[in-house]
Image: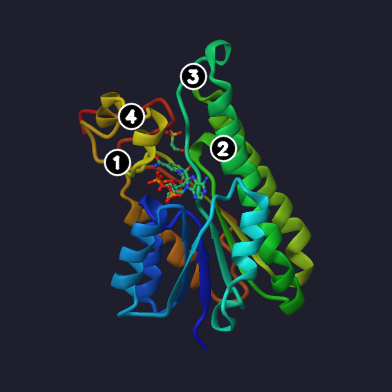
């Protein structure tokens, strides 16, 4: 039987690439994001390959998140795979001059939004005693870099929550995976630097990971046999050794 996956942050970057990868494998898709035009465009493209439903909500809004997931038509109500991907960095500032709105955005989206979506979906997984949750963390969840303070904190929280989910959902046979990428060329830096042209330099001078690289890893994780759980993956591009060491000559 065809599986159904819900992907948050499906309008761009890693989430959009994962939607394409899953469509290639015939997985039914629930695509989430706030930009309706993009959701429509992706739905139009992927509906040739699989069944697609879109949900437009802000994952910071607890009520809207639960209402959106409750609104799913019957054919999309059983969610086998949850990809908690929506998130971003906002700003890159030392802690002493950090912006409170940026801090709120990162904690509200990356941490609390992930929890709201999970809370709305986990009960059906525990009831069926099956499911797979993949949380997109970051190398920033394993290593703190200068001025990364709150973003790194949010991604350390994602990793801790992922490990907690794996422990608590273990009796139900639910797989929980953390995928932690380093630099991936998406709209991430445009958002982090709020349109400042500095964002254009982040991926220059070396070949960063592409969103499709992460999507392939996600597809690999969800296609393992029942007894195999890919628990935790750290992915760098070849030019990257740590958060701060990137060989820009490569
Ligand atoms: P993008 O900016 O390309 O995509 C972010 C996605 O998140 C968009 O689809 C956006 O959709 C969605 N999103 C953001 N805020 C909200 C919100 N409040 N409510 C609902 N959806 C939201 O970035 P990436 O693809 O790079 O990022 C995806 C994930 O990967 C994030 O969790 C990020 O932290 C993580 N990551 C990224 C890395 C990188 O270098 N790019 C490296 C490691 C991890 P919309 O605006 O339509 O709502
Ligand atoms: C995104 C990677 O190094 O910009 O999580 O924080 S980094």
Is residue 159 visible in the rendered structure shown here?
Answer: no
Real-space CA distance between mark 4 and mark 1, rounded to the nearest whole angstrom = 10 Å
Real-space CA distance between mark 1 and mark 3, rounded to the nearest whole angstrom = 20 Å
Quick one: label 2 or label 1, which is nearer the N terminus? 2
Is residue 157 visible in the rendered structure shown here?
Answer: yes
Looking at the image, residue 125 lies above or below residue 36: below
- Residue at far bottom of view: 1
Q: Name the residue tied to disc 1.
A: 208
Q: Residue at x 37, y 29 (%)?
A: 194
Residue 49: image location, x then y, percent: 33, 80
Q: Name the residue tied to disc 4.
A: 246
Label 2 or label 4, whichever lies nearer to me, is 2
How many numbered marks are there? Answer: 4
Q: Which mark is residue 146?
A: 3
Real-space CA distance between mark 3 and mark 4, rounded to the nearest whole angstrom = 14 Å
Real-space CA distance between mark 2 and mark 1, rounded to the nearest whole angstrom = 18 Å
- Determine whether label 1 and label 3 are within 8 Å by CB: no
Quick one: label 2 or label 3, which is nearer the N terminus? 2
Is 1 in front, or is 144? 1
Quick one: label 1 or label 3, which is nearer the N terminus? 3
Q: Name the residue tied to disc 2.
A: 141
Q: Ligand 2 is located in which of the four quadrants? A: top left
């Amino acid at each position: 039987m065809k599986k159904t996956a819900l992907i948050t942050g499906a309008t761009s970057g890693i989430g959009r690439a994962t939607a394409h990868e899953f469509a290639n494998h015939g997985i039914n898709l629930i695509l989430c994001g706030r930009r309706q035009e993009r959701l429509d465009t992706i739905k139009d493209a992927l509906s040739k390959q699989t069944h697609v439903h879109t949900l437009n909500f802000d994952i910071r809004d607890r009520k809207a998140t639960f209402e959106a997931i409750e609104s799913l038509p019957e054919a999309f109500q059983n969610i086998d795979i949850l990809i908690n991907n929506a998130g971003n960095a906002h700003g890159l500032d030392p802690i002493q001059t950090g912006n409170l709105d940026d801090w709120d955005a990162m904690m509200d989206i990356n941490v609390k939004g992930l929890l709201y979506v999970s809370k709305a979906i986990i009960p059906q997984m525990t009831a069926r005693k099956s499911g797979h949750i993949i949380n997109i963390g970051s190398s920033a969840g394993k290593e703190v870099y200068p001025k990364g303070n709150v973003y790194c904190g949010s991604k350390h929280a994602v990793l801790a929550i992922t490990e907690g989910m794996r422990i608590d959902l273990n009796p139900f046979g639910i797989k929980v995976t953390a995928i932690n990428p380093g630099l991936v060329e998406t709209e991430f830096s445009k958002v982090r630097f709020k349109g400042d042209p500095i964002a254009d330099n982040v991926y220059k001078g070396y070949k960063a990971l592409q969103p499709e690289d992460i999507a392939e890893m996600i597809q690999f994780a969800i296609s393992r046999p029942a007894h195999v759980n890919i628990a935790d993956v750290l992915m760098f591009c070849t030019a990257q050794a740590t958060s701060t060491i990137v060989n820009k000559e490569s």
